Image: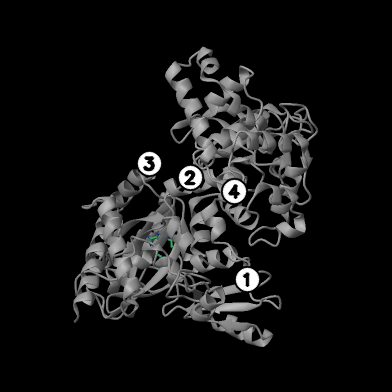
Amino acid sequence: MNQIKQQIDALREELNQHNYNYYVLSTPTISDFDFDRKLKELTDLEIQYPEYFDPNSPTQRVGSDINKSFNQVVHKYPMLSLGNTYTEEEITDFYNRVKKGLNDDFEIVCELKYDGTSISLTYINGVLTQAVTRGDGVQGDDVTANVRTIRSIPLRLHGTDYPAEFEIRGEIVMPWSVFDQINKERAEQEEALFANPRNAGSGTLKQQDPKIVAARKLDSYLYFMLGENLPTDGHYENLMKAREWGFKISDATKKCKTLDEIFAYIHYWDTERKNLPVATDGIVLKVNSLSQQRNLGYTSKFPRWAIAFKFQAEKAVTTLESVSYQVGRTGAVTPVANLKPVKLSGTTVKRASLYNEDYINLLDLHINDQVYVEKGGEIIPKITEVDLSKRNVFDEKVEFIKNCPECGAPLVKDEGEAIYYCPNDTACPPQIKGRIEHFLTRKAMNIAGGSETVEHLYNAGYIHNIADLYTLKWQDVSRLERWAEKSAKNLIDSIHASVSVPYERVLYALGIRYVGETVAKKLALAFPNIDLLEAASVEELVQVDEIGDRIAQSIVKYFSKDANMEVVNKLREFGIQFELSETIIAQRTDKLKGLSIVISGTFEKHSRDEYKAMIEQNGGKNSGSISSKTNYVLAGDNMGPAKLEKAESLGVKIIDEEEFLKMLD
Ligand code: IVH
């Protein structure tokens, strides 16, 4: 083997080991910095020597470029689910049925029931070859490219004593920390929140772009091995082997003999599970011996050798005292239930989310109702049910407010939307303060201050809009109560420094509804200065990739308001960046003007994202699907057969990397 290949292999092996230490054992032995350095070294070598490409290289964990709708794969062994039980009596019945059925000694393996998306992984000669979702149990989606990005799933197994071919099944989960972060970001963009980590995780797994999957940091727990030549007759022992090969097997997995041991396990985990980094919704009991499992067999739906016990969602009953309404920075009005304080899973609950008017109507909520609150998968408790038998005839029905609770303006609701807005964006205090707070954030103008700073400065009458920040003097700020000279100076310094924040971030910072970071970047490229953006019509705006009607209308509306234009013009006077930087502009051309190009497959010279950026930088439009309007398909390896057929049937020209790059040169 040549020296380069050896170097590549050594790096891959070393990085795989570090990934395993970090993601499975949770005990890293290398600094992030050194890890990134080695990963970069490997990436560079792989780019330089593409003949050594390997889909199982640790560099592929960041998400390969393949973009296709998922192929359906028929499961070699159907993916069954389990019978559910909710009481200890049912567990006792299960145990006795097993005892009677076997008429011999047996062991029960107790496991946590992870609340995620089930997955079946196939390994051939120690290499991950396929990952398929449960689907309907008979066939599921091939999500291999996405699953490769999950760091705790080994792409190559450790050791040598694994069967030549086997399947291992388990659950893909989204850790609470990731779920919280994603929902926080979605809330900032006023996008619909994920209800629980399971939905967020399965949504992520079905993403067409593995890079998004990689960024969302999913995790996995494996709990079921299938194949012809498994190492032992014990389910538990096989899992321990799987752990040696590199799989993440829950530490909570335990062998029990008696019902008492099983109940102790259930009681322990019913409370202890709250300290786990991922969601669990019950316990699974399995007969350990595989031959005994075969003896017991299956009913028409479930195995007779296993059963699930579901934890009770924690519920409490309390009184609905009132409903209040919060106004966000974009004017969105959110109803909140004020409850008589009640204990629920260790905390006192006083408020519950009511989401929107439709949810209130669905519950047919009345003041003084006895309501059930649950903490299920959500962090903010929610009202799940009303005890109608306790309702008093005189109790007043909750009617969603008609006017803004902060400024009195009549609320408005767009066709087909669930959320009411206060339209008085220029004079409604929480909207003004919220917009200024957003302007300060790190991803926006990165100014040293948060909600408290804004509250002080607003209440003192110093700031009424984002432009006012640039007229602040540290001497004035330091005169305010609780402001030291040093923090006042820091604030002013960071305000002054923000004049060099690039145009795309300024666009995001303006806080135009639906214009998040990504949209802002796209807008900045398509409309390289704010005058062009201001002059753009809805029709022109929707020409830009990923900008739909809703965003386009919001942008046009923003610039149509005098108050907003006044702020923009003031910011301009203060020297805020309102055009794309020279270097980015210098790279822009019109070479692909008017051309709509679809990218498909994997590439060698540049990544998909790079090609996308090149198309946009050269005036073209990158669109996701082939239609009669498509001018070219930029095709790499592994272009999906459906796409190829469609392109051919529509007579769309297919070009490769070389030809595309020639068009630009
Ligand atoms: S065993 C034939 N073990 O719960 C047995 N399932 O209701 C197959 N689940 O579809 C499943 N944790 O998605 C098993 N430790 C565990 C589990 C588990 C979560 C999920 C799985 C399954 C469903 C059954």
Q: Residues within 10 Å of mark 4 (few under 14, many from 20)?
A: some
Distance between the alpha carbons at the discs numbered 4 and 1: 26 Å
Q: Which residue is mark 2?
A: 180
Above or below residue 209? Residue 634 is below
Residue 109 at x, y percent in the picture:
30, 60
Residues at badges 3 and 2 in contact (C-beta under 8 Å)? no
Marks 3 and 1, the one that precedes in the sequence: 3
Mark in the foreground, 3 or 4: 4
Distance between the alpha carbons at the discs numbered 4 and 2: 18 Å
Marks 2 and 1, the one that precedes in the sequence: 2
Frontmost residue, 174 versus 308: 174
Query: Disc 3, ligand 1: is the CB inside 8 Å?
Result: no
Q: Residue at x 26, y 70 (%)?
A: 157
Q: Is residue 56 visible?
A: no
Query: Disc 4, ligand 1: is the CB inside 8 Å?
Result: no
Marks 3 and 4, the one that precedes in the sequence: 3
Q: Which residue is mark 1?
A: 592
Say left or right for 509 vs 140: right
Q: Which residue is mark 3?
A: 271
Q: Amino acid at mark 4?
A: Gly
Considering the numbered disc 2 on the image, is that residue within a helix, a strand or a loop? helix
Marks 3 and 2, the one that precedes in the sequence: 2
Q: Quadrant of residue 548?
A: bottom right
Residue 539 at x, y percent in the picture:
76, 59
Q: Quadrant of residue 41?
A: bottom left
Distance between the alpha carbons at the discs numbered 2 and 1: 41 Å
Mark in the foreground, 2 or 1: 1
Q: Amino acid at mark 1?
A: Leu
Mark in the foreground, 3 or 2: 2
Q: Which residue is mark 4?
A: 516
Distance between the alpha carbons at the discs numbered 3 and 2: 21 Å
Q: Residue at x 63, y 65 (%)?
A: 619
